[in-house]
Image: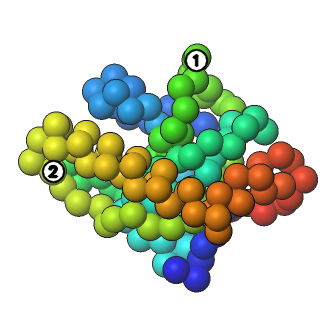
Amino acid sequence: MSCFPYYAKGEVIKGFGRGSKELGIPTANFPEDVVEKLPEAIQGGVYYGWANVDNGPAYEMVMSIGNNPYYNNEKRSMETHIIHTFSEDFYGSTLKTVMLGFIRPMKNFSSLDELVTEIHADILAARENLELPENSSHKHNNFFFGSDQKQS
């Protein structure tokens, strides 16, 4: 897609509360104003890239963009799963992400187990793609450390 890399920056807001509790896969959610700025080319689906919180280290991430049909959400969201274990929640912190590629379109699932299995497959696909030199180099992008003004 010609829109990659796509940079986004915003305050972490409370989401639906399902990531950590129901799925065991915590997510950091962008506010609506960041979601509304997404290019038209970025449709509902799962994407991969890098993310950091408050100018800390950049970690691998997967991001779900869309209405999440399994939950019948009415509003489009950007839910980022940072592939790292944080010691505490970071609501109100600044989240920066760079999306580098597409994993799969948004789809519905017949069970919660099926959804969780698919998310784990997405994480594996993200890790494999982020090992490629053209993707791994973005981990050190100045955007993450405050000196680049790219943002959505």
Q: Is residue 64 above or below residue 37?
A: above
Residue 92 found in image quarter: top right
Give 120 or 107, whichever is nearer the viewer: 120
Expressed as whole percent of the image width and height from the top left, the position of residue 107 reads 23, 60
Q: Is residue 105 above or below residue 59?
A: below
Circles 1 and 2: CB distance less than 8 Å?
no
The amino acid type found where label 1 is placed reads Glu
Give 55 or 136, whichever is nearer the viewer: 136
- Say which quadrant the C terminus sits in: bottom right
Expressed as whole percent of the image width and height from the top left, the position of residue 7 reads 67, 61
Expressed as whole percent of the image width and height from the top left, the position of residue 145 reads 83, 46
Image label count: 2
Residue identified by numbered label 1: 88
Q: Measuring 39% from the left and 49% from the top, which residue is drawn there? A: 124
Residue 13: mark: none
Determine whether, in the image, residue 56 is placed left or right of residue 104.
right
Residue identified by numbered label 2: 109
Secondary structure beneath label 1:
loop
